Image (cartoon, rainbow, N blue to C red):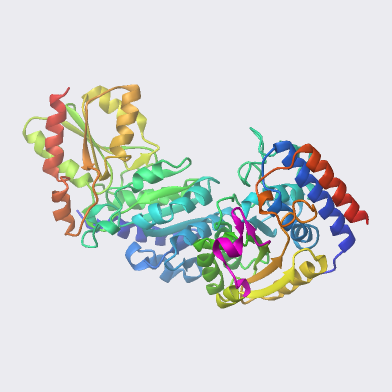
Amino acid sequence: MAKRATREAYGKALLELGQKHNDIIVLDADLSGSTKTAIFGKEFPNRFFNAGIAEGNMMGVAAGIATTGKIAFASTFAIFASARACEQIRNSICYPNLNVKIAATHAGITVGADGGSHQAIEDIAIMSAMPNMTVVVPGDGVSTEALIKQAYEYDGPVYIRLGRAKVEDVYDSSEFFSIGQANLVKKGNDATIIVCGYPLNDAIKAASSLEQKGISVRVVDMSTVKPLDMGSVLKAAKETGAIVTVEEHSVIGGLGSMVASFLAEHYPTPIQMVGLRDVFGQSGEADELIEEYNLTDSDIAHAVEEVIKRK
Amino acid sequence: MKCDYQEIAKRALNIRKNILKMLCEAKSGHPGGSLSATDIMSVLYFNHMNIDPNKYTDPDRDRFVLSKGHAAPVLYATLAEKGFFPEEELMTLRKLGSRLQGHPDMKKLPYVEMSTGSLGQGLSAAAGMAISGLVDSKDFYTYVMIGDGEVQEGQIWEAAMFSAHYKLGKLIAILDHNSLQIDGDIRDIMNPNPLDKKWEAFGWHVQSIDGHDLEQICDALTKAKEVDDKPSIIIAKTIKGKGVSFMENQAGWHGNAPCEEQTAKAIAELEERYNG
């Protein structure tokens, strides 16, 4: 399978959208080489605007563009989108429910050597808390391409969380993706791993290794974290009776919190969360950091075994 | 552009009266910065802007963004005066279920071009509208009113840089320079002066005028429209609470509504000044 970063898939999808639709305007904040919007910018220079290192203004400009019926894609690193430009996204984009797509790259600790200042570990929490916002966290290149194109069609603000590190493609091009709908990656009955973003491959690996031990684990790719696909969470809880959530994000306010609060209200089920335990990241290689913060496939497998004991 | 100053003065009088009435009814809101902006708003809506209440979604219409969103009463009163919605609706300001939110909400009131209220954000949105116009080679103008306290926000200068960089000639800002903010005189709180030199240095076409002189407002807007290689700003020296003697130049009237007695007194004074 091909290996590529979700930001690379974004750059490709954006270019294809630009070729098909005239109503897309793309903005970046001096990171277009890294976020991959430069690919669009090179092809369509009159529809690409670099806002410089000024993320708050970029979000406001995107909002203004959206009021005229065009669709603005605004990109920067997840840390700057969600934290620096937080209030502009809240009041200029979400409050008026404007059709702006925020494609934020370099999310999570797999940013690597740049260190904790540049590793957004709370962006899902911040963005999900805003009414009208949809939060999409794809785990491979194929789903990224499909969901970016869906985001274009979708009416309303969308935050798309993308990564720097390369990940193996999980899906083939025949797979169907829809914003708000989880994808069943692997069937299983003893427990369910609900995962979003970068750890998707590791979740599948964990399920396969448990299979060897005779433990049947379902893997659900929750590529839309908000609105949560409640149907598939409820089904997993009822049919497998134990849930492990996995995310490259704080367990506070992320996928784990969202699944837990939903199940607590509707179908209390033992849950184990794999994610960052209220800590910032640090410099290091992506795979070293995944190990340092206990997000590896064996950490996921261990969490599954633990949660099954609580059934 | 030919300007009927008598007509505009009459409109401005009615807008000021409605601002006072709606604030009195709402029992809260911002009279000072609404009254300081009234004459500018009257010239914009009754002389300069290409807008039609019957075609408020026309893609070629001029846009107006009230970046200093707390002056919502002057925007609502002007829109009602222009015929976008009935005058009676003004009395629903700030009440539960009203389209007239405490700060402008485009989702509730569709004639509002941008939801504003959190200071510093409206200029960026206006720049975005102008970018769309630029991409499609449209002829519409985007007007945006900012406050002189508001320019203390860093985002204003991000947007100022952006607008000049992309030569947004169809973007026209009006700075309501009434010199007061909630906590007092802008020069004491966080001095933004010299405003003209700052905007010039950021690459804007700058004019400084008396923001209550209808002829000066009209001429400045005409000149601003003629500039097509850079954004324009009109620094309009105004009086906070203009027209109501007990409110004029009083920071205390930034965010307090007049009671019924004060409202009656203020309206009587406005009418006397107009007729005299």
Which residues fall within the magenta stretch? Answer: B178-196
Q: Nearer the viewer, residue B235 or B133?
A: B235
Please check the rendered image and state whether residue A276 is part of the magenta-colored stretch, yes or no.
Answer: no
Left or right of A288 on screen, residue A235: right
Residue pictured at 36% horizontal, 61% vertical? A11
The answer to whether residue B154 is left or right of residue A135 is right
Residue A104's quadrant in the figure? bottom left
Residue B256: horizontal and vertical position, in percent? 67, 44
Question: Does residue B83 appear in this view?
Answer: no
Q: How many marks?
A: 0
Q: Position of residue A279 (x, y in %)?
A: 23, 47
Most foreground residue, B269 or B173? B269
Q: Is residue B192 found inside the magenta-colored segment of the image?
A: yes
B45 vs A297, nearest the viewer: B45
Q: Please, is residue A85 above or below residue A258 in the view?
A: below
Residue B179 sits in which quadrant? bottom right
Nearest to the observer: residue B182 or residue A190? B182
In percent of width and height, residue A191 lies at: 19, 29
Give the residue drawn at x 16%, y 59%.
A285
| Residue A139 makes an appearance in the image | yes
Tell whether B8 sits left or right of A276: right
> Percent position (x, y) of residue A71?
51, 55
For the C terminus of chain B, the image quarter is bottom right
Residue farthest along the left direction in this orientation: A213
Q: Residue at x 41, y 65 (%)?
A: A29
Which quarter of the rendering shows the N terminus of chain B? bottom right
Q: Residue A230 vs residue A186: left or right?
A: right
